[in-house]
Amino acid sequence: MKILVVRNSDTAPEGAFGEWLRDQGHDLSIVPGADLTPEAMRDAPLVVLLGSPHGVYQTDIPWIAAQRGMVAARLAARRPLIGICFGAQMLAVAAGGEVARMPDGRFFRGWLGLDQASDPAFAGPWPRWHGDAITPPPSAEILARDAGTIQAFALPNAIGVQFHPEATPALLADWARLSPEGSVEAEALAADSTRHFSARHAARHALFALLLRRAGA
């Protein structure tokens, strides 16, 4: 299957998800978020929306405002969509939900578990790197929660996860280097990544397969 992967930041590529998709025989077309067109969004058999350090509420940034409209149109057509972190937030707002900074100012960084998961495939720990909270549209099916934040939800032919199953140890190390000084204990994060990434190989692949199924792809 041809899959359109929307990289909304050079710092947040498709990582382990992209590797798994290619191993399954899928053909990935990578496009920066700023270069996404309505035609590409409309015609792709499956679209994967990736992360970004921006917020989906920053509609003063032209490509973010444009992407919201394109995602809304694809959701209305019930064409398969997967969103990760910023991508999940984009699904939520495009469907009529809301996204805002965490009310208490928290920013989640590192490998974290989930308080509630509707399917064992969601059970953590997973890498998380966000300071925003999703209020999904009323029609959404909530699939996972943690610490007062929605971590996974589904819409018809669409699914979003706030955590980062695609993140490799190298990606997490890069994010740590880009974070404010003192906000991440780099050695502890590296130790967690060494312990969890290989141990969760099967869990990661099971989740990737679930994402495709729930997107209807």
Image: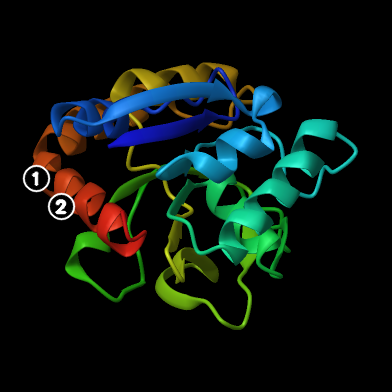
**Which residue is nearer to you in this view: 11 or 61?**
61
**Which residue is nearer to you in this view: 94 or 171?**
94
At horizontal 28% and vertical 53% (from top left) the residue drawn is: 212
At horizontal 50% and vertical 64% (from top left) the residue drawn is: 78
| Above or below for 92 versus 89 | below
Q: Which residue is mark 1?
A: 202
Q: What's the distance in space between the residues labelled 2 and 1, CA to CA?
A: 6 Å
Three-letter amino acid code at the position of disc 1: Ala
Q: Position of residue 48 (x, y in %)?
A: 45, 41
Residue 108 in view, yes or no = no
Q: Position of residue 10 (x, y in %)?
A: 56, 17
Q: Quadrant of the N terminus?
A: top left
Asked if the residue at tag 1 contacts the one at tag 2, i.e. Cβ–Cβ closer than 8 Å, the answer is: yes
Quadrant of residue 139 within the rendered picture: bottom right
**Which residue is nearer to you in this view: 99 or 90?**
90
Tell me the colour scheme of the image: rainbow
Q: Secondary structure at mark 2?
A: helix
Q: Position of residue 162 (x, y in %)?
A: 48, 53
Q: Which residue is mark 2?
A: 206
